[in-house]
Image (tube, helix red, strand yellow):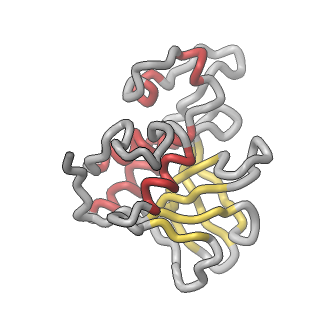
Amino acid sequence: MKRDKLGEIAKLEAQKCFHGNVMGLESNIEPIINLFPKWSLENWDGKWCAAFVYYCCMKAGFNIPVKFPDENIKCNFAGCSAWESWGSLPENQFYYPAENNSFIPSKGDIVIFNNVFLNEPHDHIGIVLENYDSYIVVAEGNINNVSGTVKRDKNKNIRGYIRIPDDYNFVK
C-alpha cells in the first residue's frame, strides 16, 4: 500500500535531520525545495513543512502535480492550504475535518494543524506514523526549521486529515 510506504518514507526522511539555516549550519533542504523551482533557498527558510510532505508523497509514488490545476486551489503544494483544498475537491473527497469522529487516522495519512507556529489556520502539516487514543506520532518538516518526529495531542490544533487513496493518480 502506498500510504504505508508514505509513512515509512516520511519516518526515514524526518530522521535525516533536514534543516534550514539553524545552529550556524548551512541549510540542507535543497532536495525538498528543488521540487518548487520558483523560490530561492532564503524564501524557504522556516517555511517548508508542506514541501516536506509533498517530497515524501513523490518518493512514495503518488502522482500529484506541484500546482493542482483548479481555480479553487490558490497556491501550490508548498502551502498547507493547498492540501486541504485539494483533498476537499468534489472529485477527491479525501479530506476529513478533525470534528469527524468516525475518521480514525492511520499511518500515511496527512495531518493539517491550526495555530502550531503562526497562530493561524492551517499553519503546519505532517504525516501520521502512529495513532493512539489521545495522540498521534507525526513525521514533520520544519519543526522550528528542522525535520523530525513528534508526538501531537489529538485534542489540540488538529484541523483535519487527508487520506490519499492508494490508487490515486492525477490525470490532466
Residue in the picture at 46% in, 46% down: 73
Residue 108 percent across, percent down from the top left:
42, 61
Position of residue 57 in the picture relative to residue 30 (left or right):
left
Q: Is residue 21 left or right of residue 32?
A: right
Q: Can see residue 126? A: yes
Residue extending furthest toward the left? 171
**Rendering quarter of residue 157:** bottom right
Up the image or down, 30 lies above or below 9; here it is above
Q: The N terminus appears in which quarter of the rendering?
A: bottom left
Residue depicted at 61% across the width and 75% down the height: 132
Residue reaching furthest right? 119
Residue at 45%, 37% in the rendered image: 76
Residue 100 picture location, percent across and down = 59, 79
Residue 15 visible in the current orientation: no
* Residue that lies at the very extreme toward the bottom in this rendered image: 102
Q: Nearer the viewer, residue 115 or 155?
A: 115
In the rendered image of this protein, does residue 56 appear above or below residue 30?
A: below
User: How far across and down, in percent of the image, does residue 142 sit?
Assistant: 62, 37
